[in-house]
Amino acid sequence: MVEVTDTDRIRAALEAVIDPELHRSIVELGMVRAIEPSANGVVDVTVSLTTPGCPIKGHFQAAVAEAVSALDGVTHVNVYFDVLTDAEKGALQQRLGRGSLPAGALARVANVLCIGSGKGGVGKSTLTANLAAALAAEGKRVGVLDADVWGYSIPRMYGLGATRPPVSPERKIVPLQAHGVKVMSIGFFVEEDAAVVWRGPMLHKALTQFLQDVDWGALDFLLVDLPPGTGDVSMTLAQLLPEARFVIVTTPQATAQKVARRAAQMAEKVSLEIAGVIENMSGFTTPAGERFAIFGEGGGDELADELDVPLLGKVPLTMPLREQSDGGVPLVVEDPDDPAAQAVRHVARGLIALAPIASLPVLSDAQASAAEPAASPKPVGMSLPMA
Ligand SMILES: Nc1ncnc2c1ncn2[C@@H]1O[C@H](COP(=O)(O)OP(=O)(O)OP(=O)(O)O)[C@@H](O)[C@H]1O
Ligand SMILES: [Mg+2]
């Protein structure tokens, strides 16, 4: 039979219950309010939620019951809920180092990967578009968030024109779909080539809206195409997505690598983990089979060594990679056997193998809508033209 002294044992079992949104255990997050075992083997557990209508309540209910019932002597588990006080929420936010806790927006996204580099034009967007399509081809549910609000290029690479994404009855923005990937970009909302001036707070709100008010649904991977440089966007995203990981793109030459190292330092500063390095524009092979190291050699290996992270792959220069990007169909879709496409597919498989959360305790659509609070919250943040 369980005894009162067994609360430690029960608490240890609850370490296995992970908040799917914050990616940490409810014990670590301070969300276990009370553990009350009784002599007849019945255990009462109270979990404190961040919001009363928390859409992932059902997940906690099932996961707590499962973890505790597995213990010897437990005959039944009752799971109760209450809500964190404002002071507790404040402490939690501080511990997570973020400005605001999401209200369930990305609860069903397992892995967020930010594709960045310190420098422009190294192929971040091209690789993001192709990697996403390659992950989708591996059977993963994938979204791409184009966070380059100044120089967005994802819509063109997916052949998505000026179509405005629809708004769902729940007032969420529905991403457009192309090549098996859900896509969201500021490019869907502004006139082509219009210069958008983004001041700090506006930028923060727009990115927040892309994360919270977009109906991403259940995703295995959300890839975020970062703008060049290590500025505001990355800082904002790091704040909003403390569990995101960086993938750093570099070219093989030493100077590019220096810049990529700067991106790595930034990742460290905002304490995001680096998932790995991709070397792009890594040599060119002529149709006759002669290879030219146009941008030098070895930058990717060296950077990966220095950061002590895996080199996820080397993507060669090939003309079709650029042509397909310009034509709106990712090369991995059009010609999966092209050397660059093969390299990207190799990176995709590596990312799947390295993903800390292979498949999230993702709620099915039916479960999620059942768990959804009756009145969905109105979108927050700035009014982009669609809201
Ligand atoms: N491996 C490659 N082979 C051939 N062309 C490539 C390759 N990688 C990228 N390119 C081309 O290089 C150009 C720059 O790529 P891309 O726009 O993806 O870079 P970026 O890092 O996203 O740039 P920015 O910093 O401006 O966002 C594009 O024309 C793209 O088609
Ligand atoms: Mg780009």
Image (cartoon, grey):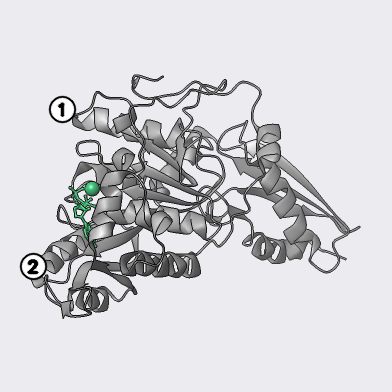
Residue at x-position 12% and y-position 67%: 258
Q: Is residue 121 visible?
A: yes
Residue at horizontal 21 percent and vertical 71 percent from the top: 282
Q: Is residue 30 left or right of residue 177?
A: right
Please state which amino acid type lies under the numbered disc 2.
Thr
- Direction right: furthest residue: 40
The answer to whether residue 38 is above or below residue 254 is: above
The quarter in which the N terminus is drawn is: bottom right
The mark that comes first in sequence, 1 or 2, is 1
CA neighbours of label 2 inside 10 A, class few (<14), some (14 to 19), many (20+): few
Q: Note whether residue 270 is visible.
A: no
* Residue 195: numbered disc: 1
Q: Which mark is residue 340?
A: none
Neighbor class of circle 1 (other Cα within 10 Å; few <14, some 14-19, many 20+) is: few
Give the quadrant of residue 240.
Answer: top left
Determine the secondary structure under disc 2. helix
Residue 31 rendering spot, x and y as whole percentages: 59, 48
- Find residue 18 and report its horizontal and vertical position in percent: 59, 55
Q: Which residue is pictured at 81% across the width and 63% down the height?
A: 3
Q: Amino acid at mark 1?
A: Ala
In the picture of the structure, the residue carrying the numbered disc 2 is 255
- The quadrant of the picture occupied by the C terminus is top left
What distance separates the C-alpha of mark 1 from that of mark 2?
Answer: 30 Å
Q: Position of residue 231 (x, y in %)?
A: 18, 46
Residue 78 versus residue 239: which sits nearer the camera? 239
In this view, 273 is above or below 363: below
Q: Residue furthest front?
A: 288
> In the image shown, does 116 or 333 lie closer to the viewer?
333
